[in-house]
Image (cartoon, rainbow, N blue to C red):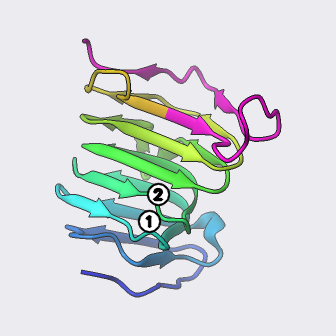
Amino acid sequence: MVYAPLSAPSACVKTFVGVPSAPASVTFTPAGSNSVTLKTAGAVTEQAAAGVQAGSLSLQGGGAFNLAGSGNAVGTVAGNVGSLTLQQAGALTVGTVDGVAGLAGTGALQLSTTSGDLTLANDVSTTASGANAIVLNAGSAAAAGTASGGNIVASNGATVSTGAG
């Protein structure tokens, strides 16, 4: 199922439940103060040129979320997922969305910005183990050692933890 682009007033919350495939584009204008919630136990895969654009994004339901479209622009993300790949161009914060603090998963968690900081304002954890259980990458488009690419910033005592193994 593919959803058409959406527009909504600035104080809007939009929830998709049982999403079999990610919308082609979910956009709220202005993005700064809107919340999008995706709830599913299944897999959500975003099309390559698609994007979720919202002030905050809540991911719920234990599904596998692959949100690697080039149009992603999310301010804050939080949720309880099976696994997550979230890539976007600008800065991203792991924070609190709709009462859920941080990111918790049972599979691999991969967060990446091509430019801009990746801020951990709340915990990031998974029960998965192994070298790629959690991958955090800020400024992935910049060459290694470039100071202006992006930073991983941990605040508020945020922790990163994986399963034993």
* Residue 57's disc number: 2
Residue 141's tag is none
Residue 46 visible, this orientation = yes
Mark 2, secondary structure of its residue: strand
- Classify the position of the C terminus by image quarter: top left
Residue 49, magenta (yes or no):
no
Observer-nearest of 64 and 54: 64
* Image position of 104 with respect to 83: above or below: above
Mark 1: amino acid: Val
The residue drawn where x is 49% and y is 42% is 111
User: Which residue is located at x 61 percent, y 47 percent?
Assistant: 113
Q: Which residue is mark 1?
A: 36
Q: Is residue 105 above or below residue 36?
A: above
* Pointer 2 local density, CA inside 10 Å: few below 14, some 14–19, many at least 20: many
Magenta residue span: 136-165
**CB within 8 Å, label 2 to label 1:** yes
Is the stretch drawn in magenta largely helix, strand or loop? loop
Residue 150 falls inside the magenta stretch? yes
Q: Please tell me which residue is depicted at 58% across the width and 33% down the height of the picture.
A: 121
| Residue type for callout 2 | Leu
Q: Position of residue 122 (x, y in %)?
A: 51, 32
